[in-house]
Every structure is written in structure tokens, then in C-alpha cells.
Amino acid sequence: MSRTARVLAAALATLLLLPCLGFGLFGLLASQEPGVGIGWTIGYLCFDTTLLGLIAAGWWAALRRDQKLPWECPACGYDRRGATDGPCPECGAVTS
Ligand SMILES: [Zn+2]
């Protein structure tokens, strides 16, 4: 994932906090008014849970490490520390 995409994902996830707090918490308070059915409370909780999930997904995408460490096989990610040069013992990929 490119750096631009990471920043974009983090920014979008952070922006989602606004409707999450606004609609979610305010809606939850409004749904506590007398005469309002339990369906609204459940609806707002579901709405907020969905938004929180999207926020978490956005940050996970932004912070996820997708670059292999120098000692990891570039093909399969196998930890090659201690292995001699030559093909990867796990997948057989030849590294330069
Ligand atoms: Zn490998």
C-alpha cells in the first residue's frame, strides 16, 4: 500500500469519528426520550458499531506492515535468519 493510500485511509477513518460521535451518541440520547421505541436504540448502536468497525479497518489498513524485513523470504515471509544462502527452505524461492 502506497504512502498516499495510507494517509488517505487514516484521514477517512478519522473523519468517520465525527458521524460516529455525532449521530451515534446524540442519537442514543434522543432515543432515550419517553415514547421512543427500543428499535431506535438498537439502530443507533448498530450504526455506531458499524462506524467503529470502519474506523478500525481504516487505521488497520494505514498502519499495517506490508514490507518484509531484510531476513524474511520476499516470496513467503519465512524467517531466514540462520539459514545459509541459496533457495528458501520453506518455499524454494531463489533470492539474490
Ligand atoms: Zn520462501
Image (cartoon, rainbow, N blue to C red):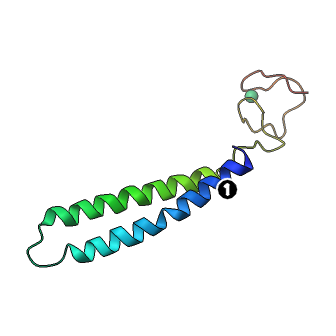
Q: How many marks?
A: 1
In the shown orientation, is residue 1 left or right of residue 20? right
Kindly identify the residue that appears in the image at 75 percent across and 43 percent down: 67
Asked if residue 11 is positioned above or below residue 83 in the image, the reply reads below
Residue behind label 1 places its C-beta within 8 angstroms of ligand 1: no
Tell me which residue sits at (41%, 71%) in the image.
Answer: 21
Find residue 92 and report its horizontal and vertical position in percent: 77, 21
Q: Residue at x 60, y 50 (%)?
A: 61
Q: Residue at x 43, y 60 (%)?
A: 52
Q: Quadrant of residue 44?
A: bottom left
- The relative height of residue 8 versus residue 87 in the rendered view (above or below) is below
Q: Position of residue 83 (x, y in %)?
A: 84, 34
The residue tagged 1 is 7
Ligand 1 location (quadrant)? top right
Rendering coords of residue 53 (x, y %):
43, 55
Residue 70 vertical placement versus 23 (above, below): above
Position of the C terminus, as image quadrant, is top right
Q: Would you place residue 56 above or below residue 88 in this image?
A: below
Could you classify mark 1 by the number of other residues whose Cα lies within 10 Å: few (under 14), some (14-19), or many (20 or more)? some
Label 1: element kind: helix
Query: Furthest residue to the left?
Result: 35
Q: Quadrant of the N terminus?
A: top right
Residue type for callout 1: Val
